[in-house]
Amino acid sequence: MKKFKIGIIGTGMRTMFLVNEILKKEELEILAVSDISQHSMEQLCSSYEKEWDKYLDYRDLLNREDIDGVIIASPDYCHEEQAIAAFEAGLHVFLEKPIAVTLEGGKKVLEARDKSGKTLLIGFVLRYNKAYRKMKELIASGIIGEVKTGWVLHSVGAGSDWYFHDWHGTMANTGGLLLQKGSHDFDIINWIVDSKIDRIAGFGSQDFFGGNKPNELVCQCCEERNVCSEAIVDRNISWKRPDGNQTEVLYNQWRNKCVYREEIDVLDNHQVMLEYKNGVKVSYLECHYTPDDNREYTFIGTKGKLKLDDANDIITVQLRNGMYDRKEIITYEHLQSSEGHGGGDKYILEDFVYALETGEQPNAGGEAGYEAIEVGLVAHRAIKEGKVINL
Ligand SMILES: NC(=O)c1ccc[n+]([C@@H]2O[C@H](COP(=O)([O-])OP(=O)(O)OC[C@H]3O[C@@H](n4cnc5c(N)ncnc54)[C@H](O)[C@@H]3O)[C@@H](O)[C@H]2O)c1
């Protein structure tokens, strides 16, 4: 068995938890990490008691001749530049979503990949989560007939925790939350509908987050922190490392800016309607201030209806066999596992290893990454311009 040597760019929250799965994979060996924060690199290494080489400049990591591939988990606005540089250095790339924050950027990443002949995996973990794979398998089997319509409700209950306390809060940094968060869902919708997007309409607003607080204000120094529902609460999170030992970090260290600060210009309420070239219509709701945290996918076909309820880990299929027999229900439960993203992290790494081994493009490849940001960016434009946009 070949052991592939890898480097990681960006050692923040995503990397902290993904490394737990990487260390379980015998085919992968981390040699080096890079981050503009020395503290972040040291914290990652000490959490896992590892002596990985550390670089403040990612180019120094890419210049090493002993690595086969790189995982890029830096903020979204860095992805395009770092992925292109990694391909120019002749490396295979696992790039966190979104592929880039502009369409031009996404195209340039694909061009660099093609020029290098290397592989590009986009961090679409839902494609590798067994519940979503089961949904894809069931729909592809024809159980609900030909899919015609559907809707996806994404309740981002931990919205302020993840997206409004730090760099995620501006359009310039993320391209908008329909890319940052929604690209996972648009990728799944594109995958299920299996057609190209044709028309997009959308409505959106900033209802809850953003405001007139100073950009410099952090929760720890705010006099309202004891009455604010969004104030970060310092708490440690502890988990079991692959070597069996427990490790822990201060969970909220990564995000502490005020969620009502002036610079926040991303929306927190999005309603998007998609029409595909094969005629399938899907609506998508992404709300960042709902108290629950769930993804609910429903598709209706000519023979029935399928619903995936992520938080309850259940898929329900309802068939319409005949006039008096439209309530036949089949359920599939307990599909997800305890690994990161319901097992998605474990299986996406398997695909990364497969790409490293074979040189073949993975399931969640660059085109999927591009098509997902295309939907997100055009949806943001439809919201802004108030019109239906044909692609
Ligand atoms: N696939 C998933 O489900 C999933 C989940 C979480 C995050 N992510 C993605 O991972 C990426 C990182 O998210 P996060 O939550 O870890 O953010 P984070 O802010 O916790 O970590 C980002 C890290 O990148 C570092 N950084 C900033 N600029 C850099 C640069 N120029 N070069 C190298 N490092 C730099 C920061 O210092 C920080 O340590 C994002 O693109 C996000 O979309 C994906």
Image (spheres, helix red, strand yellow):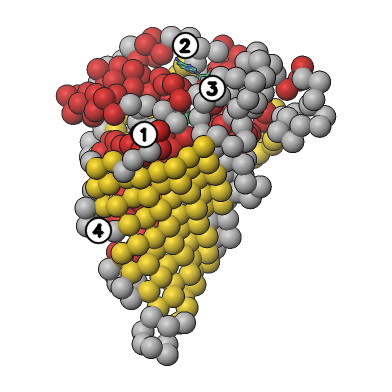
Say which residue label 3 marks. 167
Say what amino acid the circle numbered 4 marks: Gly
| Res 70 label | none
Q: Earlier in the sequence, mark 2 or mark 4?
A: 2
Say which residue label 1 marks. 385
Q: Which of marks 2 and 3 is in front?
A: 3
Residue 109 visible in the displayed image: no
Q: Which residue is drawn at 36% across and 87% down?
A: 322
Say what amino acid the circle numbered 1 marks: Glu
Q: Residues within 10 Å of mark 3 (few under 14, many from 20)?
A: many
Q: Nearer the viewer, mark 1 or mark 3?
A: 1
Say what amino acid the circle numbered 3 marks: Trp
| Res 279 label | 4
Q: Seen in the image, is 181 located left or right of residue 365?
A: right
Say which residue label 2 marks. 55
Q: How far apart are marks 1 and 2 (CA)?
A: 43 Å
Helix, strand or loop at mark 4: loop
Helix, strand or loop at mark 3: helix
Q: How far apart are marks 2 and 3 (CA)?
A: 22 Å
Q: Distance between the residues labelled 2 and 4?
A: 49 Å
Judge by depth and name the residue closer to the eye, 209 or 180.
209
Write down the quadrant of residue 108 in the picture.
top left
Write down the quadrant of residue 249 in the picture.
top right
Q: Which of marks 3 and 4 is nearer the N terminus?
A: 3
Q: Are marks 2 and 4 in contact (CB under 8 Å)?
A: no
